[in-house]
Amino acid sequence: PKGPWMALADPQSAIKGRLVFSIDMTPDRSFTALGASGKRADGLRHVEVIDHKRGSGWTLDRAIELDRKWHPIGWVVDPAGPAGSLIAGMEAAGLNVIKPTARDAMQACGQFYDAVMDTASLRHRGQEPLNTALAGADRRPLGDGWAWDRKALSADISPLVAVTNAAWGFEVFGHEEEINIANHIW
């Protein structure tokens, strides 16, 4: 629902520290979205649309540029989705690509929904591409849960899928550095 989503909007929200990027693309490849997720200084999760542009030809160069600048934990790209075609080029360029499974996609959507509706632990900047994507989004059954339905809609939900996957990637892999440091034997 729009009300709970907009209640979490914070135009000043920003990631503090490590982050995860994600790429999603519309099924017809007409638009591509890059999303990011990480934690804010107050510990709440932040999601943001980094880019949302026509086509896909610009995506690999932009991913390499962002990777060099921010040194992310990784890049979440669904190998079964349209953006999966970028994986080989990304890996050849040395980017750490995280490839979610269908089960991961279901968990990503559940985590995103819970962070908005149950725990209010997520913040966003109120970006129009993301708000529009959420307004046009629908669900499709997946296993015992659901995932975002990209095929049944006329709306471009690639910004929503990108930030959902980035948030999942950060939730799963964002604490590795902390765990490794905590378990390190000096």
Image: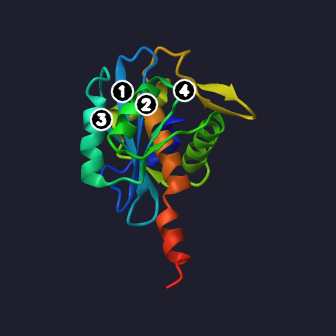
User: Dot 3: few (<14), some (14–19), or many (≥20) neighbours within 10 Å?
Assistant: some
Please name which of the two marks, 2 or 3, marks the residue nearer to the observer. Answer: 2
Query: Which amino acid lies under the numbered mark 2 shown in the image of this protein?
Result: Asp
- Residue 164 at x, y percent in the picture: 50, 40
> Upstream in the sequence, badge 3 or badge 4?
3
Q: Where residue 51 is drawn, which disc sits there?
A: 3
Residue found at x 35% / y 57%: 15
Farthest bottom residue?
186
- Disc 1 target residue: 32
* Residue 49 placement, left or right of 168: left
Q: Where residue 180 is drawn, which disc sits there?
A: none
Q: CA distance from mark 3 to mark 1?
A: 8 Å
* Residue 114 placement, left or right of 69: right
Q: Evaluate whether residue 47 shows in this view.
A: no
Q: Nearer the viewer, residue 96 or 140?
A: 96
Give the total number of marks visible in the rendering: 4
Q: Is residue 35 above or below residue 58?
A: below
Is mark 2 in CB contact (under 8 Å) with mark 3? no
Residue found at x 53% / y 47%: 168
> Upstream in the sequence, badge 2 or badge 3?
2
